[in-house]
Image (tube, grey):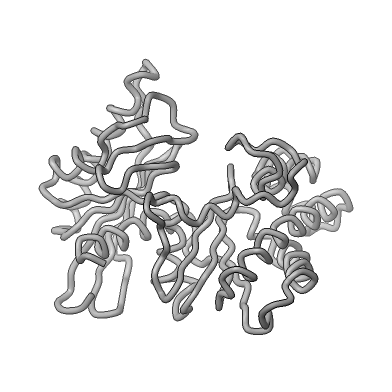
């Protein structure tokens, strides 16, 4: 993409808030120039929630465009699966209601007069970090965002790989123990089954991930042991990805990434133990830089690149 400066809107649909970001693009440079959020609007009846939220996305987009537009495209990050061709959702997590087959991109485009495109929120996180954050300059990248689940992203040759249906990059749903605990996806022994937020809390004996990190920093043995175990499981999954992809950079985001070396050290140890086919000295493990705004930012970048045919 090149040419004159353009602006692009990203929407990030979350169970608590709808975030929006407008990014400015010129040549190879990307810059976030405005952002805000509003509480996700829930209808009284669960069956009416999805349609109400889709209407809200259109309203939020119009407000953002009036504030800092015009924009050339809209990207919408959704917490689940979608059809990239039709712009319909297939399955959405943490937001109630019948989402299967629901048009999302189309109604937002109709409300704004701007082309709109869907992307999974974890892939949006990775795209944002690749273009504006901790992944800048990487030729190939693996990203994980650690929260309620374990989202993932793969970038090869400077582009996020989405696969034929937008689902490529589900690193959290690779099996690392065939007889392990059940995962929310229906499989057993996924990375996510060991490293999602509730499992971290259980391992550390804390009510929240933030508390787990705090106690570990203070040297509490159970919290330290819990984070080390989580780091080991993440390290196994990341080692698999390094063996397959041989990326330049690994980017970790989400609340638990704030633990820093308490988590990163066991990940590195597991990588060193398991990766034998490529040089791990050239693989850099870093924390994400863009925080909770990565999803909306990456959605904006995705919309811009899709509109440009990239």
Q: Count how many numbered circles sit on residues in the image.
A: 0
**Residue at horizontal 44%, vertical 26%?**
96
Which picture quadrant has residue 40? top left
Q: Furthest-top residue in view?
A: 45
**Nearest to the observer: residue 296 or residue 193:** 193
Side of 6 where 134 appears, left or right: right
Side of 190 where 99 appears, left or right: left
Q: Furthest-left residue in view?
A: 113
**Depicted 7 relative to depicted 296: above or below:** below
Side of 106 where 259 appears, left or right: right
Which picture quadrant has residue 137? bottom left
**Residue at horizontal 86%, vertical 49%?**
222
**Depicted 255 relative to depicted 15: above or below:** below
Q: Furthest-right residue in view?
A: 221
**Residue at horizontal 66%, vertical 46%?**
190
Residue 259 percent across, percent down from the top left: 69, 60
Quarter of the picture holding the N terminus: bottom left
Side of 20 where 215 appears, left or right: right
Quarter of the picture holding the C terminus: bottom left
**Nearest to the observer: residue 97 or residue 225:** 97
Residue 219 percent across, percent down from the top left: 85, 58
Residue 239 percent across, percent down from the top left: 68, 66
**Depicted 235 relative to depicted 87: above or below:** below
**Residue at horizontal 69%, vertical 35%?**
182
Residue 32 percent across, percent down from the top left: 32, 66
């Amino acid at each position: 993409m090149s040419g004159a400066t353009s602006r692009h809107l990203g929407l990030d649909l979350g169970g608590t808030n709808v975030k929006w970001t407008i990014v400015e693009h010129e040549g190879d440079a990307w810059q976030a120039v405005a952002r805000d959020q509003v509480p996700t609007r829930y209808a009284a009846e669960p069956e009416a929630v999805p349609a109400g939220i889709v209407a809200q996305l259109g309203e939020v987009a119009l407000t953002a465009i009036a504030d800092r537009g015009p924009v050339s495209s809209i990207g919408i990050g959704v917490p689940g699966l979608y059809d990239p061709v039709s712009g319909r959702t297939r399955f959405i997590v943490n937001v109630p209601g019948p989402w299967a087959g629901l048009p999302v991109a189309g109604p937002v485009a109709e409300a704004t007069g701007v082309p709109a495109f869907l992307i999974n929120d974890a892939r949006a996180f990775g795209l944002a970090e690749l273009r504006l954050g901790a992944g800048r300059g990487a030729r190939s990248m693996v990203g994980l965002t650690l929260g309620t689940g374990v989202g993932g992203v793969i970038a090869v040759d400077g582009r996020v790989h989405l696969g034929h249906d937008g689902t490529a990059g589900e690193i959290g749903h690779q099996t690392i123990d065939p007889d392990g605990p059940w995962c929310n996806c229906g499989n057993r022994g996924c990375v996510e089954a060991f490293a999602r937020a509730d499992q971290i809390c259980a391992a550390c004996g804390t009510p929240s991930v933030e508390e787990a990190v705090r106690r570990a920093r203070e040297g509490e043995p159970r919290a330290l042991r819990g984070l080390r175990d989580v780091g080991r499981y993440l390290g196994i999954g990341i080692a698999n990805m390094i063996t397959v992809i041989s990326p330049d950079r690994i980017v970790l985001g989400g609340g638990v990434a704030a633990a820093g070396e308490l988590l990163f050290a066991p990940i590195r140890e597991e990588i060193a133990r398991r990766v034998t086919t490529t040089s791990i000295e050239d693989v850099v493990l870093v924390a994400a830089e863009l925080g909770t705004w990565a999803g909306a930012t990456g959605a904006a970048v995705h919309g811009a690149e899709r509109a440009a045919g990239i």
